[in-house]
Image (spheres, rainbow, N blue to C red):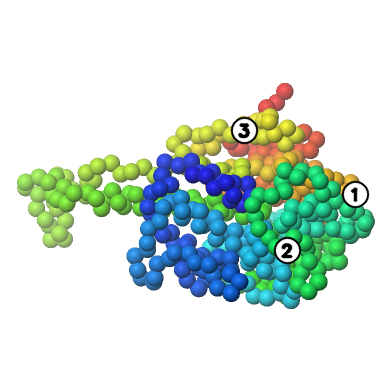
Amino acid sequence: MAFPHALGTGLIIQSTLDGDERVPLPALLQGGSNDFATCDALRMDGTASPTPHAAPGATPPTISLYDAIDILIDEYEAALSRFRAKSLVTRMRRAEHGGTFTFPDWCGPLFDLYDRLIEATDGAIDPCVGEDLIRLGYDAAYSFTVEPGAFEADGDATGNDTANRNLADDGHEDDDTTGIIGNGGRLRNGGHLGALHGRATWRDDVERHGTTLITHQPVALDFGACGKGYLVDLIAEMLETAGQHRTQVVQTDEPAGRGDERRDADDKPDNSGHISGNRPDTIPTQPMPPSPQYVIDAGGDLLVHTDEPITIALEDPANPSNAVGTAEIGAGAFCASSPSRRHWGEVAGHRLHHLLNAIDGLPVNDVAATWVAAPCTAVADGLATALFVTPATHLRAHFHFECAVLNADRTAAQSPDFPGSFFVK
């Protein structure tokens, strides 16, 4: 199953499940005032675009597995993508005086994870870094033009808007391609980058009540640090549920009376109604279907659930056609992070890319690439980013994971149980 426009990088699922299989409408896509289906992009008349869902208490309608995943991706971006013109995060960025923004219930674990990452990195990871990305040119239009005054010591710096134009369009829509908010107002902080210069922070400027966020000025959120991994986890939940549904169908389709035919002639029911005899009537008449196997690949963020491990090349950030090592994963998530595919020139001595330290708002240039293995894709994705701004030893006090790090000077390190190794001369 391929979803070429998902999250700008595309998403591919290889699975023992067929995308055409009919499954009950997943709970994530069913209605409710604070549920997934009601958080689609708002129409011009202020109503939510429709998503099929069951009435309360009714049997959910069925939908193809492929369509269910496709709707999930669309709903996900409608809530969390800063590249969508009518997404909730775009509305937050355009709200000149802030407001109250209620996200779908499934965002709760994602917000919880950001709380943990902010604590583990002492604020170096922060979704409010979206403002810095916009100022550095990584905006909804992919202008790659640095705003004047973005760098404190270089107020007249301008960006290179011609570098890496291969990133320029992934099909996302937006009718506001600038950092301008409301009636000429701009995002707070006077043009300088980072929390150090007054940029909003998740801790201080976003009041959170579950999945409801309250702000008092424009806030530009970017959930790129672990949002893609979290979507992969939600898709995996759909695949697992579809596998359970397949199992239930097999059990339901078992011919009536088969259990009785397996009893011995002298089997008698006891007082509890159970059959006493040599063979219980609970023995299945055919093997249970195996748990679904799958590999979900979201632009290099992988979740693997296979009987046999797969081998993954560790891409050389200096030359993407080469590998610097390999890893093997059979069950769990494996995520990589590197600026090699998203960089756009140099300004004021800074190589511009999307991996920033949220404290000073500057691109991190002493780490070249990271790889993380963890049970959960969202955690692996977030930690692959966090390793650019926080040492692994510090992060391991907050999370269980294995990792490998390639520094800009080509020195490398890996944790003791990392499921792979570097090529060493």
- Single out the residue that lies furthest toward the top: 425
Q: CA distance from mark 3 to mark 1?
A: 34 Å
- 417 or 112, nearer to the observer: 112
Q: Earlier in the sequence, mark 1 or mark 2?
A: 2
Q: Position of residue 185 (x, y in %)?
A: 81, 72
Q: Amino acid at mark 1?
A: Ala
Q: Quadrant of the C terminus?
A: top right
| Residue 252 falls left or right of residue 304 | left
Instruction: Name the residue that disc number 1 marks.
Output: 348
- Single out the residue that lies furthest toward the left: 265
Front label number (2 vs 3): 2
Instruction: Name the residue that disc number 3 marks.
Output: 313
Q: Is residue 105 visible?
A: no
Q: Position of residue 292 (x, y in %)?
A: 41, 44
Graded by Cα atoms within 10 Å as few (under 14), some (14 to 19) or many (20 or more), the crowding at tag 1 reads: some
Q: Amino acid at mark 3?
A: Ala
Above or below residue 181? Residue 377 is above
Instruction: Name the residue that disc number 2 marks.
Output: 176
